[in-house]
Image (tube, rainbow, N blue to C red):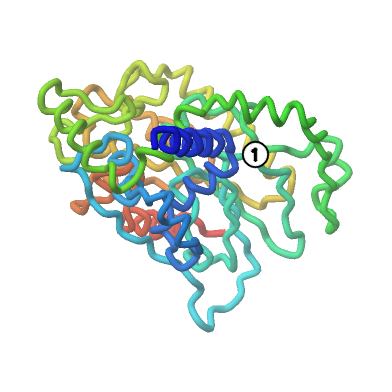
Amino acid sequence: MRKIAGLVILIVSVMLLGSAMNQSFINKIKSEKYFDHLDPQAVHESPLFKAAFVHSNKWAYGDLYGMSSLRQYKFELEPFKRYIPKPGRQSTNHILYIIGDSFLADKTLTGAFDDFDNVIFLDRRFAFGPTKIDTTKQNYLLLEFAERNLNGYDINKTDEVRWTENEIKNKVNLRNTPVQAVSQPSASIFERINKIIFNKDLSRNLEIILFDNKLAAPFHEAKAALNYKLFDRVAKEVAVSTDKKRLLFNITVDTASQQSAFRPKSDQAVDSIVRNLDLARDYYRSIGFKKVFLSIIPNPASVYDDKRMPYNHLLERVEQKTDLPTVPLYKIFKTDRRNLFYRSDSHWNPAGLDTWVNETNKALKP
């Protein structure tokens, strides 16, 4: 009996280890454990998969709750509005491109703006480009930044692949046929095996499989509550607002972080950001965009916890110095009596997004 039990334990251990080594499999688990609540109808899982990998609800209550497990901030996220074109709307022949971040990722914005027939979103968190525009349309661009992501912005240090000056001169970026991407050499079998065996995320992957699920959530919450009540300690990625009403992304408040709203910013640092925005505008105009706009989304800490320490007002200082037409938001968000950000997530809620859409509609007049 002991031999059988030992054999079973060995088999299960090997299976767990093999699963944790397979990053593609882990990515599938993460996608369906964490984000199935966003579109339940699109999730197709076998009963065996559901039984073996119990779903996690950590992201359904916000990324900051997911990182901290503080039950008093366990608020279920509201679904976002889908902005679809109104029936019978006349074509404007205008297309809006948005280069943005997680605040606008996965949002349906096709019909959000009155003066544009379509919205094309490009996520700067991942490599993309070079951007090719439709020469039969009038193309406009909106550069969207979360305030924390604007710190140290340098167009030459992004993951965007850009056209060369020679390609622009020869109008390669305006051709109708797509440019063939240079194929990367495939990894050898030995390189792939080495990557699997020495997976740097092995420990975290095992934790995802074994402990990151609904069954383990009460234990995570109990541990987090004990640390918070006895030692006033929370997960390093998270901070509690001074009024205790919400969680904040720690890098936006910790002055040791370059992204902190309370880290002093010199005029030279602001000027550097503005110069890079000018370089970005000049580049995008050179590849065919008719006009380039700027929209900076304030940090929740900048709106709801600006008395925590002296606020550096980076957002307003950049808006005042740049020549780009902007979508001013800070004062609007600051004076709005509604809550415009999730209390357990680092992003805005549907009311915040809708406020941005309304203000952007006013600013984006071709």
Q: Which residue is mark 1?
A: 127
Q: From what the image shows, is residue 304 above or below residue 174?
A: above
Q: From what the image shows, is residue 77 above or below residue 124?
A: below
Q: Quadrant of the C terminus?
A: bottom right
The residue located at (46%, 53%) in the rendering is 32
Q: Position of residue 357 (x, y in %)?
A: 41, 58
Q: Position of residue 330 (x, y in %)?
A: 32, 42
Residue type marked 1:
Ala
In-front residue for pair 271/108: 108
Is 228 displayed left or right of 95 in the figure?
Answer: left
Is 315 displayed left or right of 247 in the figure?
Answer: right
Is 309 displayed left or right of 236 in the figure?
Answer: left
Q: Position of residue 276 (x, y in %)?
A: 58, 29
In-front residue for pair 210/97: 210
For label 1, the SS is loop
Q: Position of residue 187 (x, y in %)?
A: 77, 32
